[in-house]
Amino acid sequence: MNENDLMARLDELETRLAFQDDVISTLNEQVAKQELEIRELWDAKRHLHSQLKALSPSDIRREEEEVPPPHY
C-alpha cells in the first residue's frame, strides 16, 4: 500500500469520524429536549391528577367519618 492510498484511507476515516461526531451531537441535543418534554408531561399529569381528585372525591369515607354499625 503506498502513501497516497494510506492518506486517502486516513481522509476517509477522518470524514466518517467527523460525521459520526455530528450525528452524536445532534442525537444528544434531541435526547435532552425529549427529557425536558417528558418532565413537563409528568408535571402536567400530576397536576391533572390532583385536579381530578379535587373534583371527584372518593365515595369511601375516612375511618373517623364512618358510622359505627348498629347494635342489636
Image (spheres, grey):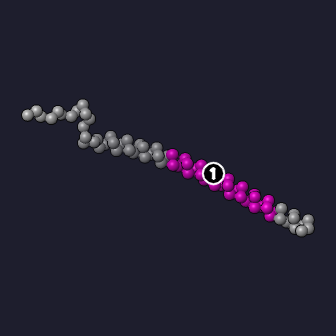
**Quadrant where the C terminus lies?**
top left
* Start-end of magenta stretch: 11-39
In the image: residue 32, left or right of residue 4: left
Q: Secondary structure at mark 1?
A: helix
The residue drawn where x is 32% and y is 40% is 54
Three-letter code, disc 1:
Glu
Looking at the picture, tell me which residue is in the foreground, 67 or 59: 67
Looking at the picture, tell me which residue is in the foreground, 29 or 7: 7
27 relative to 5, above or below: above
The residue drawn where x is 73% and y is 59% is 19
Looking at the picture, tell me which residue is in the foreground, 42 or 6: 6
**Quadrant where the N terminus lies?**
bottom right
Residue 60: x and y in percent read 25, 40
In the image: residue 21, left or right of residue 31: right
Residue sitting farthest toward the left: 72
The answer to which quarter of the image holds residue 49 is top left
Q: Is residue 33 magenta?
A: yes
Residue sitting farthest toward the right: 2
Residue holding disc 1: 29
71 relative to 29, above or below: above
Residue sitting farthest toward the top: 64
Residue 40: x and y in percent read 50, 46
The answer to which quarter of the image holds residue 67 is top left
Q: Main secondary structure of the magenta part?
A: helix
**10 Å crowding of disc 1: few (<14), some (14-19), many (20+):** few
Residue 3: x and y in percent read 91, 65
The residue drawn where x is 55% and y is 47% is 36
In the image: residue 30, left or right of residue 64: right
